Amino acid sequence: MDKELKKVNQNELNPHVSVDCVIFGFDMEKLTVLLIDRGRNKSDKGIKLALPGNLIYNNENLDQAANRVLDELTGLKDIYLEQVAAFGNPDRISKDSDREWLKSIRAEPEARVITVAYFSLVKMPDYLPQASSFAKRAGWTSVTEINELAFDHYEILQAAKEKLKQKIKIQPIGFNLLPEKFTLSQLHRLYESILEKPLDKRNFRRKIQNLEIVTSLKEKQRGVPHKPSQLFVFNEERYRELTENGFDNFDF
């Protein structure tokens, strides 16, 4: 190795690799995603909303970087993150507004950046996003209301949604978006929101109950403006029993 080559500073940002995080939530009516406002001038017509993301440091692995970036930009920490895919299109930074914004925060704004995307499912009441760093605001937005994002973040969001759709058909991961106690109507609405299609309520409830992956409680909703519904909890023991026997069809 050439001794004259400049050594990489392990504490510096790598200008060519970044991470972006797709954090899904559910407000009991619709699937949401956590976005940041990257704080451009009000007079600027460029796209402001983006997924939480940034460059990695040379001394951290991708998982560490994803957790750090999420904490720095939104205040969320110690949440489960799973890789979606890598995005390396040479035209990732094709919008003029994106290039101008990068000039204000990066030492090498023209560098080609490959990003590794992550996704996570969180219970919204458990987390209060608090914007910091270059994020001026962080908040939840319905995925159905998003038509465009900064960089290629819309493409990344679609890829994360597709992975979520596929996974929920083989694992009941949607329960990670619900409170400990929930109604079957809330569960039904969650699946409709993720799969983006109407599901027959009667057939949905029949399959859920036949699988026995939810257990009814001797409790009903409180403080609701309608007739209180029965509350249920996820039966994790039953789920483990099903998977140990090779069952993996949770499609509805």
Image: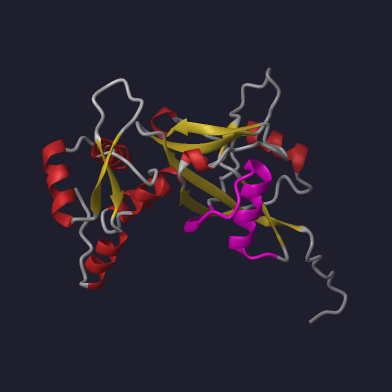
* Extreme-right residue of the structure: 4
Its colouring scheme is secondary structure
Q: Which residues are magenta?
A: 60-88
Image point (78%, 59%), residue name: 12
* Magenta span includes 8: no
Corner quadrant of residue 177: top left
Q: Left or right of 34: which side holds 235?
A: left
Image point (33%, 25%), residue name: 224
Image point (26%, 22%), residue name: 226
Which sits in the foreground, 250 or 175?
Answer: 175
Residue 130 image point, x, y percent: 64, 37
Q: Say above or below: 173 vs 221.
A: below
- Numbered disc total: 0
Q: Left or right of 202: which side holds 159?
A: right
Q: Say above or below: 87 vs 93.
A: below
* Extreme-bottom residue of the structure: 1
Q: Left or right of 206: which side holds 120?
A: right
Residue 104 image point, x, y percent: 77, 37
Q: Left or right of 193: which side holds 80?
A: right
Residue 52 image point, x, y percent: 59, 43
The answer to whether one can see residue 54 in this image is no
Which sits in the foreground, 233 or 174?
Answer: 233
Residue 207 image point, x, y percent: 14, 50
Image point (50%, 46%), residue name: 22
The answer to whether one can see residue 214 in this image is yes
* Magenta span includes 67: yes
